[in-house]
Image (tube, rainbow, N blue to C red):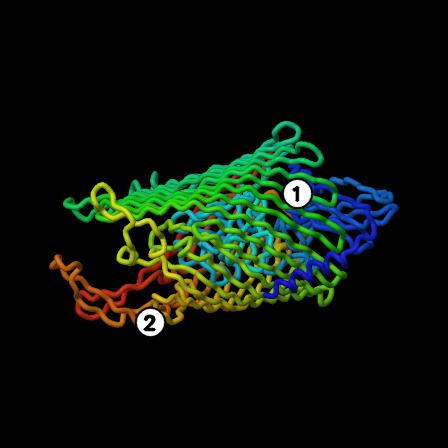
Amino acid sequence: MNKSFLLILILGSLLFGQNKNNSTISGFVFDEANQEAMIGVNVFIENLLIGASTNRSGYYVITDVPTGQVKVQTSYIGYKTQEILVNVKPDDEVKLNIILKEDIMESEAIVVSADSIPIAVKMFKADISTIKLAPVQLNAIPQIAEADLLRSLQTLPGILPLSDFSSALYIRGGTPDQNLYLLDGTDVYNPEHAFGLFSTFNTDAIKQVDLSKGGFGAERGGRLSSMIDVTNLDGNRENFEGKASISLLSAKTTLQMPLGKSGSLSGAIRRTYFDKTVAEVIDEIPDYYFYDGNIKAFFDLNANNKLTLSGYGGRDVLDLDFNTNDDFDLGLKYEWGNYTGSAKWTHVFNPKLFSNFWVTGSRFSSYFEFEGIDVTEENILNDITVKGSLEYHYSNSFNLNFGFEQKHLKLRYITKQPGVEVHIAPIRSNTVGYISTGWRPDWNWDIKTGLRFNFFNADKNYTTLAPRLAVKHRLDEKSTLKFSTGLYHQFLHRIPRFFIADIWTASNEDLRPSSSTHIILGYQRELADYWQFEVETYYKTYKDIYSYDQNFITDLEATKFNEKGDPIFQTAEPLLNRGKGNSYGFEVLLRKDVGIVTGWAGYSFANTEHTIKSINDGNSFEPRHDRKHTVNLISNIDLDNTFRWMYDMPVKQDSSSWKLGVNFVFSTGQPITEPGSAYLGLTTPDDPTRGVYYHPTEINQVRLPAYARLDLSVTWTLMFDTWKMSPYLQIYNIGNRKNVWFASYDYSNGLPDFKEQYMFPLLPTLGVNFEF
């Protein structure tokens, strides 16, 4: 990409974004019920094409406001429109905090989604490949155990799981480590719990989720593929409020309360109880449980200063017993988890200059021990970060964002096996600075440019520049054409293996930073009231991507020895194979967020290829997560009002209601490698035992059968004076389809016997949610 061209665009933006009037109207927008700051509210001046949307802190600013009396209006689905008359003087700085009240509408436009994308105007404002979701949408999708963020995201086009047993996200050909996960501004390095049933993010504690499948701006970086930014609830500043849920597999609760007159507190805890129920009855079920919790405190210090403290902690514990007889004791103990904490200071320097500053900490750790064969492994990643972002609203047609990030990383990987040890403990730092501009020369154009600078300090230092460009053009009142391109770099590498927790390592002289280029073209159109249609096509390249080398021990060179004389290896380079790749495809999404029937239908075509020198004789191959065609259908139906609509009766909200959720997914089968031949060989030269060894054909040249699954959920909501109860039934894979997880070959009879291992069968789940 021509960096000089982008710099010219930035300078041109500064020249053409001239400010004609210095009067401003600015402030925060709050929910009347709980005084929670609201994200994405449209605030505009009637009869003028000027306005703004509130940012993630609920702040807005309108510049170039004409002198005299103006009418400020708000627009947010599910809330009453506010109209406020404001007298503006020359060079005036009007502070206007706005309180919105929920609107309980009794019409066909009854609100089902709390954070809907209403009209073409908001579609135009949305960045390319970006989707916003609220908890009410996440909770409506049928799941195995409970509502889950990552499993809900897997129902969107372009986002794939590897299997039913994983909630990891493969987005547009990228791998899970290429996704940037942020929880209240803090990096989360392993957001999945075991077996794919749960993720780190408790949906009852979530305020909003911003998903970017690619082409994101210079404000974000450090990952190649995508960004998932989760904001948790600040807490109810007016009243005590709570939620609780219990199901066959887990229990959780979320509480909110005021802290004095200017603050609030929210917190959530959750625990599974496989170990106390199923594992106590069935010996084959391993002892497994996890617990997690988060807490967040918000303090409104004064009109221009706010402080937010946030924390999360979670731990998984797995105990497997492989004993087949009394002569040999073999077991696996595995623990892993995340801990995060952050302090955020929000400061308004003046109406046009808004800022956030963070101090964050994140820790991921995993430890396993094979009992009986003396094998242990420990992997730890500690991250301490100081960062800041500033938004300068020069005019309604031009804004400037800039910021910095200083990250200190400490990693440790230790594995001990009989006769060998590996000790890797690098300390790294990453210094980041960025600048981005937004220029709207007229009503029909929006041009964003950006440049991100990285200095990664290791035994070999790396300096990178990552330019970004995004252009939106309004074709007519209801349709928009969008384009985005950018260069992305990644210095941390999460290497997948057979085990649940993968290995985290960092770039050095041997492990170069990974890089990727995105090119995205999209079209959006409002088809009818609350219906939106999107189609996007993309092309991505990857350079210096890595896979795990199962035979790394044979390639290592010892640098020291332990007290037993066993070699200790201190380099990560032989652990990994380096290569390159590319992905391309297109996606179609039809979405409706408001009404008695809501949901979306999506289709994606995708192709991903990797080329790694030591794999497949250096020829390109399709990785395991490649799936050519995927179809998703999600529907949430208000049954009571559907019947009213069928009989021409008024639509309304009752104290008792029934809702039906439907989730259907179909996708091409995953690629696998077939054995071309098998032979008998000695396990080791001094061991007379013969084993069966396979010589593979070309990597991933055949595919498993197609994957298909239908899930249903029924929820009955009962509303009382001060609380609400919602019993539910969810049925996962209602057709009991045998979707193939992997295939194996048995040569015990001399000829290959193809055996399929299946994923989850039909799984019903009962539970009940409470709100009080």
Residue 669 in sight here: no
Residue 698's tag is 2
**Vertical comparison of 545 with 361: above or below:** below
| Viewer-proximal residue among 503 and 208 | 503
Which residue is depicted at the point 43% across and 45% down?
A: 427
| Type of the residue with mark 2 | Glu
Residue 82 in sight: yes
Image position of 656 (left or right of 400): left
- Residue at disc 2, secondary structure: loop
Residue 401 horizontal side relative to residue 759, left or right: right
Residue placed furthest toward the top: 260
Q: Quadrant of residue 34?
A: top right
The amino acid type of the residue labelled 1 equals: Ser
Provide residue 337's location: percent of width, then percent of height.
41, 42
Q: Residues within 10 Å of mark 1 (few under 14, many from 20)?
A: many
The residue tagged 1 is 355
Report x, y in % for residue 116. 64, 53
**Extreme residue in the right direction:** 68
Query: In which quadrant of the rendered image does the N terminus lie?
Result: bottom right
The x, y position of residue 686, in whole percent, is 12, 57
Question: What residue lies at 46% left-to-right and 49% top-to-bottom?
Answer: 729
Disc ID at residue 735: none
- Which callout, 1 or 2, points to the residue nearer the camera? 1
In the picture, the quarter occupied by the C terminus is: top right
Disc 1 to disc 2: CB gap under 8 Å: no
Q: Is residue 205 above or below residue 763?
A: above
Residue 729 appears left or right of 296 = left
Circle 1 sits in a helix, a strand or a loop, which is it? strand
Residue 396 vs 314, above or below: the answer is below
Q: CA distance from mark 1 to mark 2?
A: 54 Å
Residue 410 shown left or right of residue 276 in the figure:
right
